[in-house]
Amino acid sequence: MILLQSPSRFILQILKDRVSRYAAAQPIFLCGPNGISHVAHAEYSRCSGDKGVDIDCHTVEFDDVRYHIQFSTRNPKVMVLSVALPLAPPEAILYDGLPLGAIDAIKAAYGTVVQILDPPKDCFDLTMKINLTKLPTDEEQRNVVLTQIASVREVVLGAPLKLLLKHLASKTVAPNVDKLVALVHRPNESFFLAPQADKVTVVYPMRFQDSIDIVLATSFLQEFVEARRTAALNNAPSCMWSPVPPLELKGVNADALDANAGFVTFVVFPRHVEGRKLDKTVWSLLTFHAYVSYHVKCSEGFMHTRMRRRVESLIQALDRAKSDAEKLKKLVHGGSFRRLSMKHEGDSRH
C-alpha cells in the first residue's frame, strides 16, 4: 500500500541546503601557541566564497497547500516560510485563520527554532521565521527538527485531529468540543469527527469531479470495505461505505453532504492511537481522500495502458493478415495465362 509522505521533500531539501551552507561558511576558532584564539582562514576563505543565492520561491502540494520560501544572503541565519491552507468550508471552525490547537502544536513541535509572525504575509494563513542558529548541533537531532519543519502541513492541519485522538487514548473527551467536529482537508471540503470517550467516528463525504473517477472511486471504496473484513486486518479500524449520509451527520448542512461517491466511515478505538501509532493514524486520516484519489488515477492509468497494448496487438495482427494476403495474391498471379481460340489451337498443332 502506497502512502503519502508527511515532510515536503522540496522544503526539506532547501532547509538542508541552507543549513549546510550556513555551517560551512562559519569561521573555525582554534587556540594558538600563545593561547590566543584565531580563525582558520584557509577553511573559512574557501567556504565563504560560496555564499549561495537569495531564495524567493513558491510551491504547491496536493489539496492546494501552498508554500512561500524566502531566504536572503544578507541575513543567512534566518529563513521565512509561509503556508496557505486549503480554503475552509462554512462548517469548519477556524481560530485566527488556523485549525483548533495549531498554534500550540507549532510551539510544541519547534520550540525556540521557529517564531510565528503576526500577522502572516498576504494571501497566507501562517508565516514562520526559522532561526538556523538555534538548531541542534548534533546532526541526527538537527535532521529530525528539519524534517519536522518540512512536515508543517501535518502539524497545522492535523492539530485538531491529534488533540481529539490524544484524549481518546486516555479514554476521555476533549473539553469545549462539539459533538460533531468539521475539519478542513481539501478546498471547500471537510470531513467530520464524532468524539466519544471510547471511540471516535470519522466520516468522509467523497467527492470527485470527473465522471470516470466517480465510478472507479465508488468501486474502489466498496472493495476497500471488503478488504477490511479479511483476517489479516482484524486490528485495523472498522470501515463502512454508504451511498447516503450516516446517522452521525444528521443535521449537517446539505451542501456539506453533497457527495457523488458515497460516504466512508472509520471507527477509531484507543488501541489505534497508543504510543507511536498516534502520528501515523493522524496522517493516514488527514490524507485519506488524497490516498483514494492517487489510487483511482493509478487504476485509470493502468487501464489506459492495457487498452493501448491491446490496440497495438490488434494492429499488429491486422498487419500480419494483410502481409499474408499480399503474398498469396502474388503467388496466384505470378504467371501469365492466355485463352487460345480453335484457330490458334489448330495452328499450334502444325
Image (cartoon, rainbow, N blue to C red):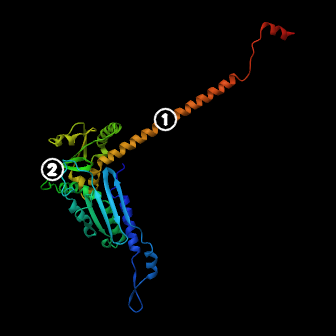
Q: Looking at this rendering, what residue extends furthest in the left direction? A: 176
Residue underneath mark 2? 196
Q: Secondary structure at mark 2?
A: loop
Q: Amino acid at mark 1?
A: Arg
**Quarter of the rendering containing residue 105:** bottom left
Residue 234: tell me if it is visible: yes
Question: Circle 1: is it few (<14), some (14-19), or many (20+) Cα within 10 Å?
Answer: few
Query: Please, is residue 229 above or below residue 69 in the view?
Result: above
Q: Quadrant of the C terminus?
A: top right
Where, by quadrant of the figure, is residue 322 drawn?
A: top right
Q: Residue 310, which numbered label?
A: 1
Cβ–Cβ under 8 Å for marks 2 and 1: no
Q: In the shown orientation, is residue 126 left or right of residue 36?
A: left
* Sequence-wise first label, 2 or 1: 2
Identified at 42% across, 42% down, the residue is: 301
Q: Residue 125 in the image: x percent, y percent?
A: 25, 58
User: Going 24% across and 36% down the picture, which residue do you hit?
Assistant: 243
Residue 132: percent from left, percent from top: 33, 70
- Residue at image x 25%, y 39%? 259
